[in-house]
Every structure is written in C-alpha cells, then in structure tokens.
C-alpha cells in the first residue's frame, strides 16, 4: 500500500468515526468533500462499519418540571402551551387546540399511544 493510500485510509476512518458530514470533516481537514467520498468508495470503507454495534439512538432526557404555588403569576388563558424538546424542536399548542388533533401529533412524534 502506498503512502497516499495509507493517508486516505486513515483520513476516511477518522471521518467515519467523527460523525460529521463529509463537507464539515473535509473542510476541517483542508480537502475536497468529493475526494473524501471517492476515497471512501475506492477503499470500500462504509460508515456503518465504524459505528459501535451497541450504539442506540439517544432517548430524550427527562427534564424536571417546576410546579409553582397557586399565587404565582399564571399564564394568560390566551397564551399558547409550548413544549420544547432537548434537540431544540418546539411544539406550540394554541389555547383553542383540538384534543384529538394534538393526540395524533403526539402519536406521530412517537409519544404516548
């Protein structure tokens, strides 16, 4: 194996282990993303080979809920309910929501059945 092949084999392995997109990794390495893909194919190196078999998708963390006393300032009845997920996704529920529709949305997002 020549030096260039060794360098690219190492670079492609580091890319696959990094979890970054080809564009981001290539930019950090100072190489072209297309060239990175090309070497990956040429060397027969697939990203799935570098992921640990025990890796499972991360489940959302449970976050604490703060309950305030009854005399605390209550939100306006016209205020929307906001559900913010750890990844930054936000679900806004208007005060006049339809319960059946909300239940379908929650099921679609993988929540309660």
Image: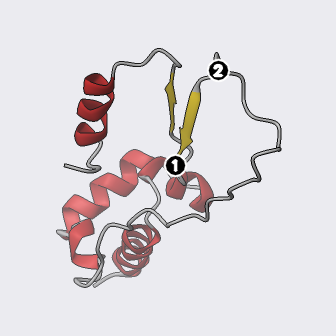
Query: In the image shown, does 81 or 73 lie closer to the viewer?
Result: 73
Q: Nearer the viewer's eye, disc 1 or disc 2?
A: 2
In which image quadrant can residue 99 be found?
A: top left
Q: Which mark is residue 77?
A: 2
Q: Which residue is situated farthest in the right direction here? A: 72
> In the visual, does 35 lie left or right of 103?
right
Question: Dot 1 surroundings within 10 Å: few (below 14), some, or many (20 or more)?
Answer: few
Local SS, label 2 = loop
Which of pointers 1 and 2 lies earlier in the amino acid sequence? Answer: 2
The image quadrant where one finds the N terminus is: bottom left
Local SS, label 1 = loop
Colouring scheme, one of rainbow, by chain, secondary structure, one colour: secondary structure
Q: Which residue is situated farthest in the front direction here? A: 70
Q: x%, y% of residue 78?
A: 64, 16
Q: Residue at x 21, y 67 (%)?
A: 46
Q: CA distance from mark 1 to mark 2?
A: 23 Å
The residue singled out by tag 1 in the image is 85
Relative to 82, residue 11 above or below = below
> In the visual, does 106 lie left or right of 26?
left
Q: Residue at x 47, y 59 (%)?
A: 20
Q: Which mark is residue 26?
A: none
Question: Dot 2 surroundings within 10 Å: few (below 14), some, or many (20 or more)?
Answer: few
Relative to 92, residue 38 above or below = below
Q: Residue at x 68, y 58 (%)?
A: 66
Q: x%, y% of residue 71?
A: 82, 44
Q: x%, y% of residue 32?
A: 48, 48
Q: x%, y% of residue 83?
A: 53, 40
CB under 8 Å between discs 1 and 2: no
Relative to 103, residue 80 above or below = above
> In the visual, does 24 lie left or right of 74?
left
């Amino acid at each position: 194996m020549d030096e260039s092949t060794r360098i690219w084999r190492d670079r492609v392995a580091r890319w696959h282990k990094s979890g970054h997109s080809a564009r981001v990794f290539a930019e950090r390495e100072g190489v072209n993303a297309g060239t990175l893909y090309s070497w990956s194919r040429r060397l027969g190196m697939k990203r799935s080979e570098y992921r640990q078999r025990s890796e499972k998708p991360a489940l959302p963390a449970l976050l604490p809920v703060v309950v305030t006393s009854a005399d605390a300032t209550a939100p306006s009845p016209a205020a929307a309910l906001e559900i913010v997920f750890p990844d930054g996704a936000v679900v806004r529920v208007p005060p006049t929501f339809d319960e059946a529709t909300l239940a379908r949305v929650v099921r679609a997002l993988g929540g309660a059945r």
